[in-house]
Amino acid sequence: MPSKLTKAALALSVALGLSVSSNVAHADEHKVLKVGCEAAFAPFTYIDDKGELIGFDLDLIRAMGKVMGYDEVKITALPFDGLIPAILTDNIDLIISGFTISPERANKVDFSDPYYMCGLTFLVNKSNEDKLKKISDLDGKDICLQIGTTGALYAQKALKNANLKQFNSPPDTYLELQNGGCVAAINDRPVNDFFLKNYKGKDIVSKTITTENSEYYGIAVNKGNDELLGKINKALLEVKKSGEFKNISMKWFGRDISEDFK
Ligand code: GLN
């Protein structure tokens, strides 16, 4: 008869053996989609009070990951200007991060079909509202931007004599604006709007720079990764067909954003 101790050891090794072998089997099949985003871009990609990565883009890619047959969608938060380098070194499979499809970026990565349309706005203090109405009014002034973004690129071209102060994320630009370190913060319209909607004060207002159909967000993959890109475009169509895209859109925007463009 085995002693109580050997019985326990046996039971333990069986349990361990089982769990080890099931882990191995699991590791073989477990398909992970590695997603990179910048996590201070509400309402698309950001961290909530509980430390969870949430947002429209993340709901969308989680839904698409399931449709594409992945067991897990692993989301890594990176600095905005670290996203393309992370793709190029295969640390992530794709970027979804309110990421505008642009000719400059298309030299380095391939883009999916667009899923969101937007433009740029700038925020100013209410006290400056009458003086700073349009983009040209910002020339020669201190302006806050997010580094590496389309807004930053736009400002470099449009504001030759401005002092462009570059920050890592939109929230940093808002803080600087509130502290008087700049007179305007340039960002994507929905991001500035989301900030204003949740902002308790009444001292900041928004001004339009470019029309709403001047930028389109897309999902970026490594150049030449046609297999993944094909799956992404197919999954995008499927979540639109199934109504899931609409549900996610209603949750974040209160309307179906796929109706904005065809
Ligand atoms: N849409 C802008 C861009 O692609 C900003 C994106 C972001 O900061 N996440 O440059």
Image (spheres, rainbow, N blue to C red):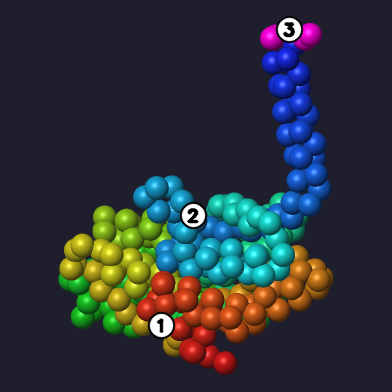
Asked which quadrant contains residue 25, the reply is top right
Name the front one of labels 3 and 2: 3
Identified by mark 2, the residue type is Leu
Q: Which residues are magenta?
A: 1-5
Query: In the rendered structure, which disc, 1 or 2, sits on the residue that comes first in sequence?
Result: 2
Q: Which residue is mark 3?
A: 3
**Left or right: residue 106 compared with residue 127:** right
Identified by mark 3, the residue type is Ser
Identified by mark 1, the residue type is Arg
Residue 103 image position (x, y, % from top left): 66, 78
Q: Which residue is mark 1?
A: 255
Residue at left 35%, top 69%? 194
Query: In the rendered structure, which disc, 3 or 1, sits on the residue that comes first in sequence?
Result: 3
Which is more toward the observer, 71 or 206? 71
Q: Secondary structure at mark 2?
A: strand
Taking 30 as reference, is 247 above or below it? below
Q: Which residue is mark 2?
A: 53
Residue 143: say if magenta.
Answer: no
Residue 87 image position (x, y, % from top left): 71, 59
Look at the image and tell me whether residue 91 can be seen: yes
Query: In the rendered structure, which disc, 3 or 2, sits on the residue that comes first in sequence?
Result: 3
Q: Residues within 10 Å of mark 2 (few under 14, many from 20)?
A: some
Structural distance between the alpha carbons of marks 1 and 2: 22 Å
Residue 4: say if magenta.
Answer: yes
Taking 21 as reference, is 190 above or below it? below
* Residue furthest front in the image: 1
Magenta segment, prevailing SS (helix, strand or loop): loop
Q: Secondary structure at mark 3?
A: loop
Residue at left 74%, top 73%? 231
Residue at left 25%, top 74%? 205
Which quadrant of the figure contains the N terminus?
Answer: top right
Structural distance between the alpha carbons of marks 3 and 2: 51 Å
